[in-house]
Amino acid sequence: MARLPMGSFPRRFGRLFLSAVALLASAPHKPLSAQETSALQVGARIRVWSSAPETSGRVARVLKVRSDTLLLEAERPLAQLAVPVRTLTRLELSRGRGAPVAGTVVGLVVGVAAGTAAGALVGALSVAHARSSNNCPDGDCGFVYLATVPAGALAGLVAGAVVGHRLGREHWTAVPLPLRP
């Protein structure tokens, strides 16, 4: 049985993994079926646009669906709204947060960049302080960057990945109007 060189397996696996992530991230989301749009469920998270009361993309939870009115609990600021169905101009239903992979990758990249910059800044401040207090006997304090930049990059990588993972983007699907409760 022929053995693959050790370096080729990780490269092939990495390409396969990145291809799978790209494919999943670009896949279209399944639209709602006719049954799902015929009536909103109590507790559903929606974004609503209406002319009376005037709302533009306000996020709310459905409390009750009547034939002529939606009773909602709006977020930020917390308030209850009664929205006449005839005044609805647009309505979207939350499909939940997307796969956290994309947010994690963006967080990783931003975190590494910010952490590297912070590490370089800490290094520069350390070198300036050491030179001003004559703590560089050979005149070269630049080796401090070998510790501060990688430490900053690592801290940024971890923090960015965690924050990016937690801040996944929410997916919304348009609900056809008029509603049929």
Image (cartoon, rainbow, N blue to C red):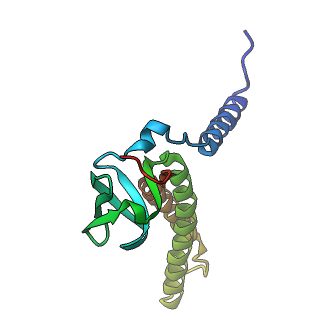
Image location of residue 152, percent across then percent down:
50, 65
Q: Looking at the image, is 26 positioned above or below residue 77?
A: above
On the question of residue 128 being in view, the answer is yes
Q: Looking at the image, is 39 positioned above or below residue 169?
A: above
Instruction: Tell me where residue 84 sits by quadrant.
Output: bottom left
Query: Residue drawn at (51%, 82%), measured in percent from left and top?
Result: 125
Q: Looking at the image, is 52 positioned above or below residue 173?
A: below
**How many labels sit on residues?**
0
Query: Residue drawn at (41%, 54%), measured in percent from left and top?
Result: 166
On the question of residue 144 being in view, the answer is no
Image location of residue 151, percent across then percent down:
49, 62
Residue farthest toward the bottom in the current orientation of the protein: 132
Out of 134 and 56, give the one closest to the viewer: 56
Query: Residue drawn at (75%, 13%), measured in percent from left and top?
Result: 2
Image location of residue 24, percent across then percent down:
60, 39
Query: Residue drawn at (42%, 43%), measured in percent from left and top?
Result: 38
Please state, as top left, top right, bottom left or bottom right, where the N terminus lies in the image: top right
Out of 78 and 131, give the one closest to the viewer: 78
Image location of residue 108, percent across then percent down:
54, 56
Out of 113 and 148, give the one closest to the viewer: 113
Q: Residue 97 vs residue 20: left or right?
A: left
Out of 2 and 163, give the one closest to the viewer: 163
